[in-house]
C-alpha cells in the first residue's frame, strides 16, 4: 500500500525523544519506521478472496501490533511492536486485518478522516469513563455536571461526546487560535495563559519559594474558575492526557464521585496521590490505551453517520519533505491545530 495522509501523534514524539522508552532498543532493531495512523491506498492484496479490501481502496490503518485475549492492543503498530513498518515511507506493506475501508461515498475529506486515531481513542476512553461515573451517579441529569479536559485532539473529541451526552463541557487552551476553535465548537474555553504557573515547579525551581507561591496563586485561580463552571461541585469527569505537571490540580478540581479519565501521557507518566483521600472522595481512575480492534467498524460508522469527526479546515498538513520540521514544531508547541498531518503521496 501507499500512505496518502498520516497523522502526527504523541507516540511519534515519544519515539524521537526515546522517552518513556527507547523503541529501537525495546524492539531489538537498529531503526524503526514510525507512523501508525493515517489514510492509505491499497496497491496489491496478497490474500484469499474473503478479505474486506480490494486494490485501489482507501483505508484507515488500525495501529494494533500485538493483541491480548480480549483483542485490546498490548503493543502498538509502528511503535513498540517489533517488525512493524509505519507510514513514514512512500510504499510499505502490512497485514490486511489492520485495514479498515473508508465508507463508500463518504461526506468527509481525507484530512478529516486522517484524524480518526484521536477519535477512536476518545470513543473508547469516554465509554469507559462515562460508564464508571454512572456506577456511582446513576440517574442525575448530566446537565448538572461538568466535564473538563486538558490535552489535545483526543480530549477535544472526548468533550464533543460529553457534550452530546448533555454535560457542560470546558477545556483549557493556550493560544488565541485554540480558544476560538473551542468556542466555535460549543466548548467553554479556559485560557491557560491566565494561570502561568499552574504546572509543578521543575527540578531546578523546587527551592524557589517565590515560584511555589506563584503556583499556589495560579492553582487557586484555576480552581475558582472550575467552581464557577460547576456550581461549586467540581469536575464530574476530568479528561487528563497531560500527566505529572498538572495531576495534583486535576485531583483538586475533581468532584466527589468524580472520574479521572486518561488515555495519554504527554508530559509525565509517573504519578502519585493520597490513596485514602481518593477513596474517601470516591474517585475512580480510568486508564485506557488505543481501543478494541473489533469495535473499529462501529466507531467508523458512528463518525460518518453523526458527523463526529475533525471539523473541516481544522487540520494543518506538512509535505513529506517537511516532516522533520513538523516533528520540531510539534515538540516545541508551535502548532495551533489539534490535528497535525503529513502528506506522503498525492491522492
Image (tube, grey):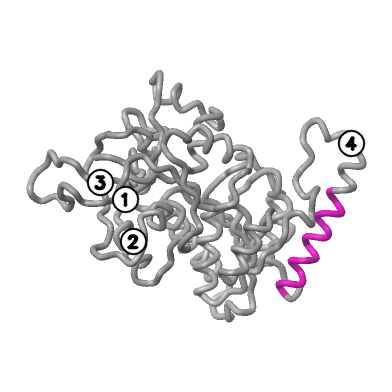
Residue 56 is one of the magenta-drawn residues: no
Q: Is residue 93 left or right of residue 155?
A: left
Query: x, y (%) of residue 192?
Result: 73, 55
Residue 41 numbered mark, or none:
3
Of callouts 1 and 4, the N-terminal one: 1
Q: Residue furthest left?
A: 49
Q: Are marks 2 and 3 in contact (CB under 8 Å)?
A: no
How far apart marks 1 and 4 lie (CA) works out to 49 Å
Q: Which residue is mark 2?
A: 300
**What residue lies at 70% left-to-right and 49% top-to-bottom?**
246
Tell me the element at label 2: helix
Side (left or right) of 195 relative to 1: right
Q: Earlier in the sequence, mark 4 or mark 3?
A: 3
Dot 2 or dot 4: first in sequence order is 4
Alpha carbon of mark 2 to alpha carbon of mark 3: how far?
17 Å
How would you rate the neighbour count of disc 4 (Cα within 10 Å): few for under 14, some for 14-19, many for 20 or more? Answer: few
Disc 2 to disc 1, how far (Cα)?
A: 10 Å
Q: What is the C-alpha distance between the residues marked 4 and 3?
A: 55 Å
Residue nearest the observer in this picture, 207 or 190: 190
Q: Are marks 3 and 1 in contact (CB under 8 Å)?
A: no
Q: Residue at x 87, y 42 (%)?
A: 211
Magenta residues span 215-230
Residue located at (38% from left, 44% from top): 73
Label 1 Cα crowd, 10 Å radius (few <14 / some 14-19 / many 20+): many
Q: Position of 100 compared to 38: left or right?
A: left
Q: Which residue is mark 4?
A: 208
The residue that label 1 is drawn on is: 60
Do the residues under discs 2 and 1 have CB atoms within 8 angstroms? Answer: yes
Amino acid at each position: 500500500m501507499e500512505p496518502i495522509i498520516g497523522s502526527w501523534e504523541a507516540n511519534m514524539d515519544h519515539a524521537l525523544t526515546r522517552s518513556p522508552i527507547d523503541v529501537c532498543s525495546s524492539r531489538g532493531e537498529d531503526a524503526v519506521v514510525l507512523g501508525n495512523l493515517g489514510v492509505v491506498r491499497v496497491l496489491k492484496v496478497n490474500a484469499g478472496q474473503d478479505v474486506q479490501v480490494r486494490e485501489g481502496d482507501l483505508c484507515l490503518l488500525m495501529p494494533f501490533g500485538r493483541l491480548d485475549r480480549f483483542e485490546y492492543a498490548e503493543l502498538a503498530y509502528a511503535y513498540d511492536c517489533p517488525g512493524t513498518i509505519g507510514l513514514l515511507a512512500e510504499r510499505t506493506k502490512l497485514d490486511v486485518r489492520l485495514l479498515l475501508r473508508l465508507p463508500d461515498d463518504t461526506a468527509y475529506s481525507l484530512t478529516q478522516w486522517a484524524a480518526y486515531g484521536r477519535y477512536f481513542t476518545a470513543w473508547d476512553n469516554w465509554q469507559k469513563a462515562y460508564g464508571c461515573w454512572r456506577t456511582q451517579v446513576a440517574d442525575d441529569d448530566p446537565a448538572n455536571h461538568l466535564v473538563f479536559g486538558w490535552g489535545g485532539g483526543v480530549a477535544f473529541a472526548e468533550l464533543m461526546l460529553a457534550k452530546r451526552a448533555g454535560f457542560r463541557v470546558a477545556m483549557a487552551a493556550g493560544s488565541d487560535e485554540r480558544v476560538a476553535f473551542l468556542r466555535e465548537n460549543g466548548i467553554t474555553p479556559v485560557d491557560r495563559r491566565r494561570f502561568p504557573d499552574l504546572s509543578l515547579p521543575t527540578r531546578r525551581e523546587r527551592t524557589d519559594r517565590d515560584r511555589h507561591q506563584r503556583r499556589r496563586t495560579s492553582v487557586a485561580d484555576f480552581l475558582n474558575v472550575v467552581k464557577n463552571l460547576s456550581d461549586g461541585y467540581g469536575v464530574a469527569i476530568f479528561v487528563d492526557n497531560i500527566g505529572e505537571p498538572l495531576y495534583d490540580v486535576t485531583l483538586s478540581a475533581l468532584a466527589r464521585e468524580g472520574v479521572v479519565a486518561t488515555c495519554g501521557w504527554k508530559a509525565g507518566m509517573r504519578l502519585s496521590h493520597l490513596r485514602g483521600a481518593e477513596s474517601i472522595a470516591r474517585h475512580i481512575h480510568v486508564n485506557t490505551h488505543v481501543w478494541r480492534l473489533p469495535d473499529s467498524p462501529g466507531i467508523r460508522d458512528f463518525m460518518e453517520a453523526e458527523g463526529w469527526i475533525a471539523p473541516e479546515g481544522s487540520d494543518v498538513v506538512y509535505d513529506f519533505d517537511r516532516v522533520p520540521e513538523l516533528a520540531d514544531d510539534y515538540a516545541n508547541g508551535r502548532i495551533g491545530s489539534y490535528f497535525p498531518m503529513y502528506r506522503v503521496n498525492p491522492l
